[in-house]
Image: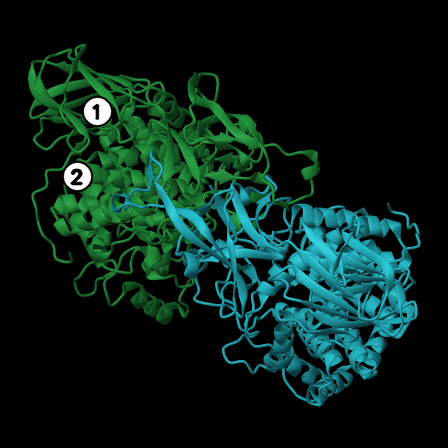
Chain colours: A green, B cyan
Amino acid sequence: MSTTEHTNFKPLKAIPLRQVTIQDPFWSARERNVIGTVIPYQWDALNDGIPGAEPSHTIENFRIAAGDAEGDYYGMVFQDSDLGKWLETVGFALSKERNPELEKLADDVIDLLGRAQQPDGYLNSYYTVKAPGERWTNLRDNHELYCAGHLMEAAVAYYEATGKRKFLDIMCRYADYIGTVFGAEAGQKRGYDGHPEVELALVKLYQASGNRSYLELSKFFVEERGQQPHFFDAEIREREALQGASGKKKRTYDYFQAHLPVKEQTTAEGHSVRAVYLYSAMADLAVEYGDDGLKEACRTLWNDTVGRKMYVTGGIGSSAYEERFTVPYDLPNDRAYTETCAAIGLMFWAQRMLQMEKDRKYADVMELALYNGVLSGISLDGKSYFYVNPLEVWPDTANFRNDMHTVKVTRQPWFGCACCPPNIARLIASLGQYVYSAGEDERELYVHLYVGSKAGVELAGVPVQLTQQTNYPWDGQAELQLSLQQPADLTVCLRIPGWCRKWTVSVNGAETDAGEPVNGYAKLTRTWQDGDRIELSFDMPVELMHSHPNVRSNAGKVALQRGPIVYCLEEIDNGANLQDLAIASDAQFDVNYDAGLLGGVAVLTGVGSRSVIPAKAEGILYGTRPFERAAAPVKAIPYFAWSNREPGEMTVWIRSS
Amino acid sequence: MSTTEHTNFKPLKAIPLRQVTIQDPFWSARERNVIGTVIPYQWDALNDGIPGAEPSHTIENFRIAAGDAEGDYYGMVFQDSDLGKWLETVGFALSKERNPELEKLADDVIDLLGRAQQPDGYLNSYYTVKAPGERWTNLRDNHELYCAGHLMEAAVAYYEATGKRKFLDIMCRYADYIGTVFGAEAGQKRGYDGHPEVELALVKLYQASGNRSYLELSKFFVEERGQQPHFFDAEIREREALQGASGKKKRTYDYFQAHLPVKEQTTAEGHSVRAVYLYSAMADLAVEYGDDGLKEACRTLWNDTVGRKMYVTGGIGSSAYEERFTVPYDLPNDRAYTETCAAIGLMFWAQRMLQMEKDRKYADVMELALYNGVLSGISLDGKSYFYVNPLEVWPDTANFRNDMHTVKVTRQPWFGCACCPPNIARLIASLGQYVYSAGEDERELYVHLYVGSKAGVELAGVPVQLTQQTNYPWDGQAELQLSLQQPADLTVCLRIPGWCRKWTVSVNGAETDAGEPVNGYAKLTRTWQDGDRIELSFDMPVELMHSHPNVRSNAGKVALQRGPIVYCLEEIDNGANLQDLAIASDAQFDVNYDAGLLGGVAVLTGVGSRSVIPAKAEGILYGTRPFERAAAPVKAIPYFAWSNREPGEMTVWIRSS
């Protein structure tokens, strides 16, 4: 596995964002919310204009770095990345519709970045303002390349949306400079960032600019990681010689995914966001270089992540301490960390694995994370956020026990460490690029997600327009219509979701035998005519989900899922002490769409049981007789929508009686 | 409730320790272990002579204070109390059998205390060595009176065992001095210690010395607690004026049980050890002063503690953060704090409530804590200790998750904060005083605990010798024999344990109708003859214990209990992933005494079920079908004996299927 082998991959390619328009009852409102509300709100946040929110100082830091203002740097060392994510979101927004006012705002801040850029191309407000002589002295802890990466991603998005090169050029200059600092040549640093991000960003920068040196630099960073002698040790020695101190407390290498060379890593370890950002870059490089060893490492890491360390919501990283993976099957619900950014990063990685492997299983996880562990991170109004996404909350203790101090019962307006809010904004704004792919022989059109949309793509020279209409995720119907200038031989590959046991596909009203799905995709190959219509129908019953028995915290419990949506119980609907509520192993639930609830959600209602607590039981904690139980109504709402009403208890996993 | 009302209590009185000799298959070995092994071991610990253990420096601190040595103070501010508890244990040991060598050691260290005592009577090594000008400037945080209290308790025990007055005189001098510093007179401090202890110690000092001013001082401390304007605030202001800083971060008053005057307190709050030490003193004063308001406050606090905040093991204080009570029914098993000292303190309080109220319910809790949450704190060899006593352990995560950093999987040889080891030693060494009481009219002889022993007591002038033989807790038989110099009219009051549903009592071989127990005590009133024999037989089936449904962490689970012994499952007997193991709601268990196991324990064996995990389930975390289950053997051992073999998983609460 440690040698590089080359295979001719023919990966899928996402249909670029600017060619996809979301027109969807579920997602359009969320997209509009991001563009119309979240982008301005987060701009205010970056300018410290949100009353009651933790200050950001991000723009001011750049103004000081540019010489436009005087003052001290304030914030985390990675504050620059918040602007990167915001600008990337703006880029995604502009790719849908140009907006002169927003573009002016972005251009002005890009000008500011230009002024803050140093003559040699360096661009980082923390070091420029606070420690100008100390560049590249603490790669392990100080996120210097991480910030560069987010600005690179933003520059690519902005360039692709607007065609304007200024930001792209700024970031290419910075990348060129980084390329002089890092490398295997004498006098260069054989190092890499403690927080992976620049690696995947450099791949994007290469793809946008065509400059292959950025891809090579990404490969260098990924391949150096975890090599011996260890860069972080050498760096500490240099820093001690220079500054007389080694900086923050030493963490173990696995926290940084730097415990082994990446091809030798077989288990997901350490900080979960760092992990999935790295694995995303590894998948990119596996494809770009046709590297079988890297591909196999990605598969192994994937299986460990989703097969042993993922919550039913698609959340990952179960421990608040170091925001990290712990041991297999350690998935406590009340102390779940499951950072919003980690679920987003899992989507990034899943999409890349999907393009590489063309296997539904990656799309299933991408979809699961999207509708649950990602979407729970933002309130319905777009103005408050969860950093941590527990699967069980008892507010009385969450506010009390120090061992759950990271768990919040309500979403927060902003964070001192504000990585999640702009991350979820850019994810929603870029959703279009997760829906479709074009296939290897250029005649395959893949549908991964069922999201109402229009997509335009050229397959082997044939322009194809696809219109998708659906009420997903609330029902399992989707209709796809092709617009063609002339009949075309194409294969339409339709994802049959992993959660679906029964489905039909019709073409122009006639049910069609699509044959056995290939890697989970029903493949319809024919000479398609303009106006051809595909109708999909996925059975979407309420399922009682069971955990692998090794997940101790879910022993004897079930979760409710319907389609891609994982449900939860809230106190407001079910009363307090949700752990006492139990449902039978064959419980049936009614599904009703409630347009007036939580922005419109399908609600599950059924009957479970609860203990009958006689008055004489008050003050008696333990006894030899079980309490009698009586029927009790159960009402479940989608997990992503929890905590949008009165704060209270919540649980995803429900006792099975 | 805030006014003091007086009632003529006729409380029970414990039969003093020197009049009770333990001769018991279960306890004698433990008592011998404490006297023969633990006392010397802990003496070594106080002298920093245990390789690999955290240093103590306790004796050295006193040597420096006495001018016998030079050096700096080292350790917690309350290091003195460790010597107090050790000397108290020595006192208890000597009350059983004088031991010249041990007595010499104690006398020497008492001489050292005499040399360390300041001319005005003050005796505290921390302030004497480290901050001689700052006495009484931080009552809230620095345990000055707490340390005094432990030395007072030791002095009383040593005096009662040996008749030597030196230590008692030292502590009376110190108490006299304290009485000049604190009080309601002008120029005196209207204060009290952040950690209650001196209050109950002063009651003992009063009882041993006959000097009622100590009782009055205890009453002053208890009644001042929580009054407004708040002493801790005044103290901070004075300290700021004096030292320019306010000391440690301010905690809320309830941490110190100082949020309200004690008679207005209705719920158990704050640091759990502090709480039960205070409540013990409140019960003492309620009896001494016949104070109905204090008695009612004790009852209310008791009901809240044992009815809403106690583990099934008798452990209390469920949160590591501030070692405290949290909210009702918040009793997580894996993050149980349940400090050994808190269970010991609960025994102290329970005994006082029992003497005051003559109600079995207090003896039940005293017994429950003794055999479970207290005894789990010490290893079978007496040389290692749990500070924290969880009810569920998964070592892989306990060593990994920061949110369970206080949980240890194996007992430790010593602690930097070493309150628990000497506390459990003194508890075991003084067990004799918990077994019997003499009743109000001096003709009632109460038997609270079934522990093989001989006790001598004079009831209204009639000397009575009682010999108890039992194999408790492994079976429910006990035989009591009376030795009388002449026939005597007495009432023998026999506790019918709360866990027992069926029992018989015989006198001289003939089953006797003892009538309905009074407050849980079967009362046998007759003219007893020398040699009369009482045989008790308590049915002791294995019980499946259920929690109140409000205890979320035990929903759907049962615990095994037999007699007073709570059982647990260990990985070494049952394999890993104990949460998957389930037992039926009507599961039957065999009971077998295994003399070779864990020092001799009754083992429970039965059949439960476990998931069958097919190979194809590897790497699949969630699915729609439950796993099949197959019969699996279940073997339970007493909770107190866990972690005396190979380290591994443990659980008290078991899934009920």
Foreground of the two, B459 or A596: B459
Any part of residue A320 in sight: no
Asked if badge 2 and badge 1 are on a common chain, one would say: yes
- Tell me the amino acid under the disc marked 2: Glu
Task: Give the image location of residue A340, x and y in percent.
Answer: 40, 40
Label 1 neighbour load within 10 Å: few <14, some 14-19, many 20+ = some
What chain is tagged by disc 2? Answer: A
Foreground of the two, A552 or B111: A552
| Relative to A612, residue B175 above or below | below
The picture quadrant where one finds residue B466 is: bottom right
Any part of residue B532 in sight: yes
Question: Can you identify the residue that label 2 sits on?
Answer: A357
Say what secondary structure mark 1 lies in.
helix
What chain is tagged by disc 1? Answer: A
The residue most toward the front is: B510
Q: At 11% from the left edge and 20% from the top edge, which residue is drawn?
A: A463
Say what secondary structure mark 2 lies in.
helix
Question: Can you identify the residue that label 1 sits on?
Answer: A19
Q: Earlier in the sequence, mark 2 or mark 1?
A: 1
Task: Give how far apart the Cα atoms at labels 2 and 1 are.
Answer: 23 Å
Label 2 neighbour load within 10 Å: few <14, some 14-19, many 20+ = some
- Tell me the amino acid under the disc marked 1: Gln
